[in-house]
Amino acid sequence: MDEKEFQQKLIQRYLNNQCTDEELEAFFHLIEKGLITDTLIQEMDVVLNTDEDSNHEDEQPDPELKRRKLNLMRLLGYAAMLLVCFSACFYFFQHRIHTINTAALVKYDTVETQRGEIKRIELADKSVLFLNAHSRLRYPEKFNGNIRQVDLLEGEAYCAIYHDKNKPFIVRSGNINTQVLGTAFNISFYKYLKSVSISVTQGKVSVINFGQNRQPAKSILVAGDKISINKLSGKTTYSKIDVADDAMGWTTGKLIFDNKSLSEVAHVLSDRFNTEIGFADNSIMRYHVTATFNSTDRLSDIIKMLCISNKLKYRTTDQKIVLMFN
């Protein structure tokens, strides 16, 4: 059966009040898209002409009167078709009104941190989130329905989630959903990083990657687990962490770098101290660093330590620090 035949059969079933729920939805969908208007007119013409012929097959009415009646019947048919269109609009409106009203009732806030700034956010359900420097978070003023969800649009957040077994908590960061009932975990979702990282300090979380053109990949993490997911390839890497420091050290001002590239380190330091850090040679960006710095350490001291350990030097120009070879 080709598309034309399918449309004719669907229209006939509708005019005969024989459509199933699935056929009715398909019929209204085609009406909404304007895909069967011409076919509908043709089918109604056939019905009207058939009725006209059957009612007067033994009569010889006046031609002008017959023409007027036929035009009137067609006009009524078109009016009926418009009624069908209005019915379609009403059907879809009724079908979606609950979702629209629900969305309209939810108000969202977006909080953003600047370089060198850390914010504490308490949500309506008593969950507490710490937002690292240069980060953005979108969350509802109150949670409706059976799911609590926030969006980490950029940056890093440490989440201490209030336990509610009936309302899972979801943090969405790009294509990745991190779902919990009640636990504590950290998410790093900076744009300059190639991977999204989730570290768990308490409880258990489910991490689902809805990567492009891939089947969703699900991972279960418990306290002390860390997962890194490459944004492009979807490749996952698992590791263990010191839950006291690695996941939440930054919330107290501590800086922990575990085999991080100098490029990543420079971004973190720039956000923390609101100072641009660059490189005289791009190859320096690929150097790797493992180090821990306290909240009381000054940027100048940190830069000196990085230079000593990597046999580099630096200069300061126009409020920018540039690392270079000795």
Image: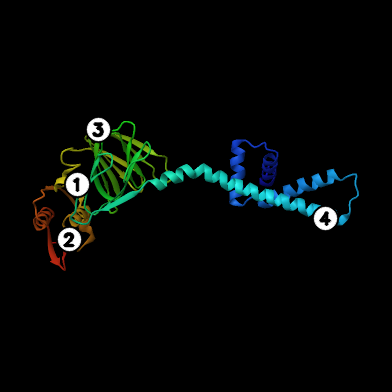
* Gap in angstroms between the C-alphas marked 1 and 2: 22 Å
Crowding near the residue tagged with mark 2, few <14, some 14–19, many ≥20 C-alpha atoms within 10 Å: some
Q: Are marks 1 and 3 in contact (CB under 8 Å)?
A: no
Reading the chain from its start, which is encountered first: label 4 or label 3? 4
Residue matched to label 4: 67
Which residue does the image show at 34% across and 43% down from the upper left? 176
Q: Position of residue 110 (x, y in %)?
A: 30, 52
* Gap in angstroms between the C-alphas marked 3 and 2: 37 Å
Which disc number belongs to residue 34?
none
Reading the chain from its start, which is encountered first: label 1 or label 2? 1
Which is more foreground, mark 4 or mark 3? 4
Amino acid tagged 1? Asn
Which disc number belongs to residue 259?
1
* Gap in angstroms between the C-alphas marked 4 and 3: 80 Å
Say if residue 36 shows up in the picture: no
Which is more foreground, mark 4 or mark 1? 4
Which residue does the image show at 72% across and 49% down from the upper left? 77
Q: Position of residue 7 (x, y in %)?
A: 67, 45
Q: How many marks?
A: 4
Q: Position of residue 178 (x, y in %)?
A: 32, 40
Reading the chain from its start, which is encountered first: label 4 or label 1? 4
Reading the chain from its start, which is encountered first: label 1 or label 3? 3
Crowding near the residue tagged with mark 1, few <14, some 14–19, many ≥20 C-alpha atoms within 10 Å: few
Crowding near the residue tagged with mark 3, few <14, some 14–19, many ≥20 C-alpha atoms within 10 Å: some
* Gap in angstroms between the C-alphas marked 1 and 3: 26 Å
> Which quadrant of the figure has residue 17?
top right
Which is more foreground, mark 4 or mark 2? 4
Residue matched to label 2: 275
Residue matched to label 3: 203
Q: Are marks 1 and 2 in contact (CB under 8 Å)?
A: no
- Element type where label 4 sits in the image: helix
